């Protein structure tokens, strides 16, 4: 591939796909999925709503209400498909872009905004949702997911962990160590790599000479490449991998072949490093349009349904905006809270000193 | 009372922790069948099984990173880093994740992970096997940092560390692993965050931790017949720091020398000197002096006797303090 050729526009032959970009259901020899009309409509609703939350967050950042936002635009199917494959007992370890998975784990979208607005570093209880906090250091969470899975093994529990990371993360030492650990201990973990073609400005060929899913074989476990814009395929492939993990068959690497439609974050400018043609080509593979086409084509939903979802999305966007603006700034003493679980003399001393210093201004 | 080496005291402490709480795990390189390169985990895998005493792949970041995951699942892992100079591949997991995740979670997550690190020199080792990296970790909010100096403390401190809900960097003075002392296997020690006056004295205060405590006690004994009465404090905990014991002592003696193996420049002694200056300014007869390693990388072992503070260098600093 030349440096300026559009990336990933021609689907690689090994891609697991169950729903074409045109909304046509296709067969795959190894994977299949049975979905009721209600289930497909529900997936469609998920996709639309998380995109709406994401657009609202981008707008909030543009208006100065968030410091930064990492958009999931284009990656909705990878996140909803894999997220809906999880059982309540499974545990998910996200990057900072997994807003769709958070949605599947019932995390209030406003709670995602806290760290981007700067009111906290993570605003939800991971144990309540079995959805870990966003991890910003690239790839660190892969080891946490494997350790968690080793705990699941020791508990004899019917569960697995799934860890999200991107194509850039596969170059990190921690990700490679996590592959080794998972393999050696046969840990019940699914590695879900969203290959969105770009690590900020660096294309995939700066990270790998081979397709990412093939990395798994060198570590001794299966790898599979799935159409990351196909919610059916992502659901089917992740379900299988999770079930294998729960049944003691060890880890799987899933490479969800997708595209980051937006910038890396709101601070990024993709026009400096990639072609508009590439974006246009990927728009034709949109993860939501193909489900809409499928629903239409098979008369599983009518115009009223789509309008209802749009209205729900608008209401959600409005609600998220309103509650984001109402997020209170934390009081200064919050800095000193939760640094340590047990009493810590230095923390208490500095807290008291600073509060009495502040109190001096109020007299 | 039982006579134990420091290494064996740690072993007994770990054993008791594992007996008391089935969630306690031991993990690291060679900690299983071999019992660790210093034999601190000797026999634990035989008695508690491979599920609880885990020989890990040879990757330090992986050890700490997976320990975090195990802690998130309710376990209490005790990680062994084989030598001080090998902790750096794990520094990212320790500093960006282990130390900060509880705050990130607004207190909903606890990470009761102990990272044991044999530290310090004096054993004639090759490069990377003799370092004192404690200041990197005392500078990281969210970690507790402790150092044991003797078998009795080793036995109780490791148990306290395992019981603590915060992540702890637990430094072990490797050249003292073979020192023997009486240990009360039924007893409990000082709280983990408390310093101890190990030798009472009137004329000057020596402050140390880990391997230098013994050096300071020997220095104090050596000048006793000259009429110098030196007090020795074993800090035990570096973060948090028990300033009450330090301040009480220096206000009485008016003179203070801080001793550690780590380089003096921006070493832990700098923090002590600054704090003592603040808390004891009107009681000081001389500036707080520091004795430690030079601002060089740890030297080849044939030179380490020059690099490491010894009795003479400690007493030279005491003389300089009295010269003010």
Image: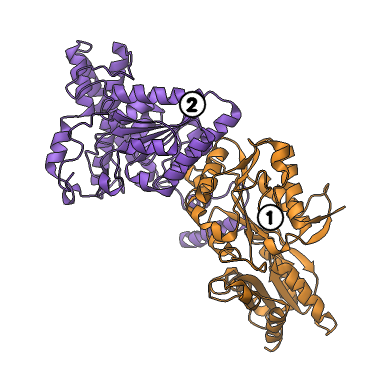
In the depicted structure, whether residue B299 falls above or below residue B2: below
Work out whether residue B310 or residue A319 is closer to the camera in this orientation and state it: B310
Q: Which colouring convention does the figure follow?
A: by chain
SS state under label 1: loop
Q: Residues within 10 Å of mark 2 (few under 14, many from 20)?
A: some
| Circle 1 residue | B38
The x and y percentages for residue A120 are 42, 46
Query: In the image, is B276 to the left or to the right of A13?
Result: right
Q: Can you tell which chain is drawn orange?
A: B
Query: In the image, is A265 to the left or to the right of B206?
Result: left
Contact, mark 1 vs mark 2 (Cβ under 8 Å): no
Q: Residue furthest left?
A: A277
Give the residue at x 73% y 63%: B176
The answer to whether residue B99 is visible is no
In the depicted structure, whether residue A248 falls above or below residue B60: above
Q: Chain A's colour?
A: purple
The answer to whether residue A158 is visible is yes
Work out whether residue A52 or residue A7 is closer to the camera in this orientation and state it: A7
């Amino acid at each position: 591939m030349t440096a300026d050729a559009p990336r990933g526009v021609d689907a690689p032959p090994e891609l697991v796909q169950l729903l074409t970009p045109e909304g046509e259901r296709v067969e795959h020899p190894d994977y299949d999925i049975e979905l009721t009309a209600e289930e497909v409509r529900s997936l469609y609703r998920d996709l639309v709503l998380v995109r709406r939350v994401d657009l609202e967050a981008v707008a909030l950042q543009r208006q100065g209400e968030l410091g930064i936002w990492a958009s999931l635009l284009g990656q909705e199917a990878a996140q909803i498909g894999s997220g809906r494959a999880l059982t309540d007992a499974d545990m998910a370890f996200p990057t900072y872009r997994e807003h769709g998975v958070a949605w599947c784990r019932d995390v209030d979208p406003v709670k995602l905004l806290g760290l981007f607005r700067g009111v906290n570093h993570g605003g939800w209880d991971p144990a309540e949702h079995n959805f870990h906090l966003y991890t910003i250091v690239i790839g660190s969470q892969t080891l946490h997911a494997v350790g968690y899975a080793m705990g699941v093994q020791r508990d004899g529990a019917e569960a697995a962990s799934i860890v999200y990371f991107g194509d850039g993360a596969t170059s990190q030492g921690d990700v490679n160590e996590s592959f080794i650990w998972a393999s050696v201990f046969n840990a019940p973990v699914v590695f879900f790599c969203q290959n969105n073609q770009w690590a900020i400005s660096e294309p995939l060929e700066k990270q790998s000479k081979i397709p990412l899913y093939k990395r798994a074989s060198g570590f001794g476990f299966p790898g599979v490449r799935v159409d990351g814009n196909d919610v059916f395929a992502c659901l089917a492939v992740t379900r299988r991998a999770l079930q294998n993990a729960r049944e003691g068959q060890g880890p799987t690497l899933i490479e969800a072949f997708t595209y980051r439609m937006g910038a890396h974050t709101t601070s990024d400018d993709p026009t400096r490093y990639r072609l508009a043609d590439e974006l246009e080509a990927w728009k034709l593979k949109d993860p939501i349009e193909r489900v809409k086409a499928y629903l239409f084509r098979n008369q599983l939903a009518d115009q009223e349904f789509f309008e209802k979802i749009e209205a729900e999305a608008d209401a959600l966007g409005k609600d998220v905006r309103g509650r984001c603006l109402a997020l209170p700034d934390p009081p200064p003493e919050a800095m000193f809270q939760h640094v340590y679980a047990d009493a810590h003399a230095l923390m208490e001393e500095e807290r008291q000193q600073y509060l009495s210093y502040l109190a001096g201004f109020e007299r | 009372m039982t006579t134990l080496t420091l290494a064996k005291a740690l072993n007994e402490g770990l054993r008791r922790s594992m007996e008391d709480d089935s969630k306690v795990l031991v993990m690291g390189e060679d900690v299983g069948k071999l019992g660790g390169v210093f034999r601190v985990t000797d026999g634990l895998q035989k008695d508690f099984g491979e599920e609880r005493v885990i020989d890990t792949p040879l990757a330090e970041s992986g050890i700490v990173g997976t320990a975090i995951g195990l802690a998130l699942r309710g376990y209490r892992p005790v990680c062994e880093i084989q030598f001080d100079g090998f902790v750096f591949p794990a520094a990212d997991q320790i500093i960006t994740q282990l130390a900060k995740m509880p705050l990130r979670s607004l207190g909903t997550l606890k990470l009761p992970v102990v990272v044991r690190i044999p530290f310090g020199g004096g054993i004639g080792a090759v490069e990377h096997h003799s370092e004192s990296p404690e200041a990197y970790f005392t500078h990281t909010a969210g970690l507790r940092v402790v150092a044991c100096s003797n078998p009795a403390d080793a036995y109780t401190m490791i148990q306290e560390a395992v019981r603590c809900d915060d992540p702890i960097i637990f430094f072990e003075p490797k050249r003292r692993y073979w020192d023997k002392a009486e240990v009360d296997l039924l007893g409990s020690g000082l709280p983990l965050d408390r310093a101890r006056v190990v030798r009472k004295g009137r004329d000057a205060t020596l402050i140390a931790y880990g391997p230098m405590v013994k050096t300071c006690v020997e220095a104090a004994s050596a000048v006793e017949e000259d009429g110098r009465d030196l007090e020795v404090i074993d800090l035990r905990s570096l973060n948090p720091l028990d300033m009450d014991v330090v301040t009480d002592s220096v206000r009485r003696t008016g003179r203070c020398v801080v001793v550690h193996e780590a380089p003096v420049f921006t070493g832990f002694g700098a923090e002590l000197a600054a704090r003592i200056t603040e808390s004891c300014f009107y009681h000081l007869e001389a500036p707080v002096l520091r004795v430690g390693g030079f601002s060089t990388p740890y030297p080849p072992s044939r030179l380490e006797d020059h690099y490491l503070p010894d009795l003479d260098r400690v007493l030279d600093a005491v003389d300089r303090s009295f010269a003010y």
